[in-house]
Amino acid sequence: MLTLEQKIAKTLTRDGKTLSLAESCTGGLIANRLTDIPGSSLFFTLGIVAYANATKTKLLKVPPFLLAKYGAVSSQVAKKMASGARQISKTDFGVSVTGIAGPTGGTKNKPVGLVYIAVSSKKATQSFRFVFKGTRTVIKKKAASQALCLLFKAIA
């Protein structure tokens, strides 16, 4: 039985499609899981861990006004991170994750565990909102797994 990562690798490779990532709260976990697959260089082009807002702006082309208006943990910023990664690396798909892994940093409106995941293709960019429960490590792992699920749905 193939793992989710293996299914993604098989599908992208078969279709000749490429992927880039922009990770914040997952800290590179998605890239790590994908690069555990032998031959991942056939489809995986770029992974950026953009933790600081300045990095999101400089590397991923997230407009500063979006960060100021909505905050780094928002649907709007997740979408720009995903499309920015896709555009700068010229890949078929871009995936981003931004959130609050905790244990601190949460507010009433943006609690610990709030995560936005975006998937970008040449056709559309969609963002999805989640609130995960658990420790920092658990939230990061859940966010990475959910991002891979959303990616697989987009490419399948």
Image (spheres, rainbow, N blue to C red):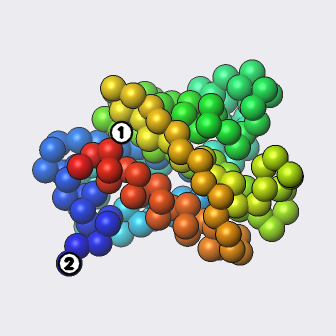
Residue drawn at (76%, 60%) of the image? 112
- The residue at 32%/44% (across/down) is 154
**Quadrant, the N terminus:** bottom left
Q: Quadrant of residue 119?
A: top left
Residue 89, position as x, y percentages in the image:
40, 34
Q: How many badges with numbers are in the image?
A: 2
Q: Residue at x 32, y 53 (%)?
A: 152
Residue 1, numbered label? 2
Element marked by disc 1: strand
Q: Please indicate whether residue 81 sits to the left or right of residue 88 in the image.
A: right
- Tell me the quarter of the picture where residue 102 sits: bottom right
Which quadrant would residue 7 be assigned to in this image? bottom left
Where in the figure is residue 116, as x and y percent of width and height?
60, 47
Q: Horizontally, is 122 left or right of 102 in the view? A: left
Q: Nearer the viewer, residue 14 or 126?
A: 126
Type of the residue with mark 1: Phe
Q: Is residue 99 left or right of residue 144?
A: right
According to the picture, the residue beneath numbered tag 1 turns out to be: 93
Q: Is residue 102 left or right of residue 154?
A: right
Q: Residue at x 86, y 52 (%)?
A: 107
Q: Is residue 23 above or below residue 35?
A: above
Which one is nearer the viewer's eye here, 79 or 34? 79
Disc 2 is placed on an element classified as loop
Q: Is residue 135 above or below residue 39?
A: below
Q: Is residue 137 above or below residue 72?
A: below
Q: Amino acid at mark 2?
A: Met
Pointer 1: residues within 10 angstroms few (<14), some, or many (20+)? many
